[in-house]
Image (spheres, rainbow, N blue to C red):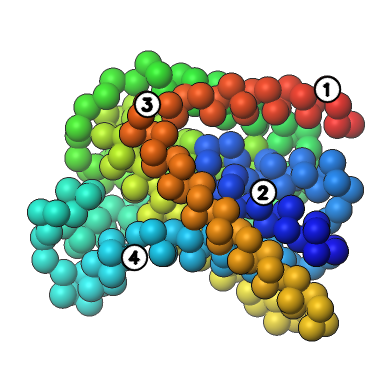
Amino acid sequence: MDLIQVVILGVVQGLTEFLPISSSGHLVLAEKILQIKSENIAFEVFVHFGTFMSVVVIYRKEIRGIVKAMFGFASPSPQDPLTDDYSKLLRLLIVGTIPIAGIGLLFQDLIEKAFTSHLLASLMLIITGAFLLSTQFSKRKSEKIKWVDALLIGFSQACALLPGISRSGFTIGTGLFLGIDPKKSADFSFLLALPAILGATFLKIFELFKEEFTNQQFFGYMVGAFVAFLSGYVAIKLLLNLVKKGKFKYFGYYCIAAGILSLLFLR
């Protein structure tokens, strides 16, 4: 890949990782449209690290509290935007991570094969769009996140292992249907992304050590990671603002249109 292609894919990864329009589906379609394919696993590892860091920067306060909770130093915080103390939040994130960890490991080969089909990605984008539009019928309450909610949101996140299914769209949308406050649902979704992204990267990083790449390639991957970080940061801030304004459902129109157009024109 040349530098322009690296930047394009980095922007696509960063924006679509957190906006409810499916990063996996858009990367499959972008590679199809641009007739490019990352030649090794390195690029994927680098851009995922970039999006990981965008969450870390925005949620650094919560992450600091979670880390303290892991070692037993956390205490309840009334000012916490998630309303739960960090120890409870840590337990909820662990419960929410179980589905994607189990399903991802059990069906890893099938999932990787799914990423070779732009047809599947297109169909799943349409399904994502329909789900997002349906969230307008959810009952808006201010329920706290319970462990059952975390588990259900976790299964929604596991659905996003398929290309075209939006991780943030399904997790935030599920939270809305469970009566969780939109802001709390979005915050939990982004924090839940951390172990998922870290786990996916960890599985790939051993393959990375087996590969050889030039200094020029390494520079390109660093650029991709930085671009993914910046675009991911913008995407999170944008989505948090739109969720609070009740405009989450409008991404559904885009996903349906993108899925239909890709079915019609990409063969």
Q: Viewer-nearest of labels 1 and 3?
A: 3
Judge left or right: residue 123 versus residue 61: right
Mark number displayed over residue 264 = 1
State the image quarter where residue 166 is shown: top right
Choose top left, top right, bottom left or bottom right for residue 252.
top right
Q: Residues within 10 Å of mark 1 (few under 14, many from 20)?
A: few
- Quarter of the image with the N terminus is bottom right
Residue shown at the point (74%, 76%) measured from the top left: 219
Q: Which residue is mark 2?
A: 12
Which tag, 1 or 4, sits closer to the chain's start? Answer: 4
Residue pictured at 20% horizontal, 34% vertical: 143
Gap between marks 4 and 2 measured at Cα: 24 Å
The amino acid type of the residue labelled 1 equals: Leu
Where is residue 192 shown, x and y percent of the image?
40, 53
Calculate the distance from the C-alpha at mark 3 to the C-alpha at mark 4. Answer: 25 Å
Question: Is residue 71 depicted above or below 1 in this figure?
Answer: below
**Cβ atoms under marks 1 and 4 closer than 8 Å:** no
User: Residue 167 location, x and y as percent?
Assistant: 51, 43
- The span from disc 2 to disc 1 (Cα, nearest Å) is 21 Å
- Mark 4, Cα crowd under 10 Å, few <14 / some 14-19 / many 20+, is few
Q: Which mark is residue 246?
A: 3
Contact, mark 3 vs mark 4 (Cβ under 8 Å): no
Q: For residue 247, say whether it is visible.
A: yes
Quadrant in the picture for the C terminus: top right
Which residue carries the number 4 mark? Answer: 60
Element type at mark 3: loop
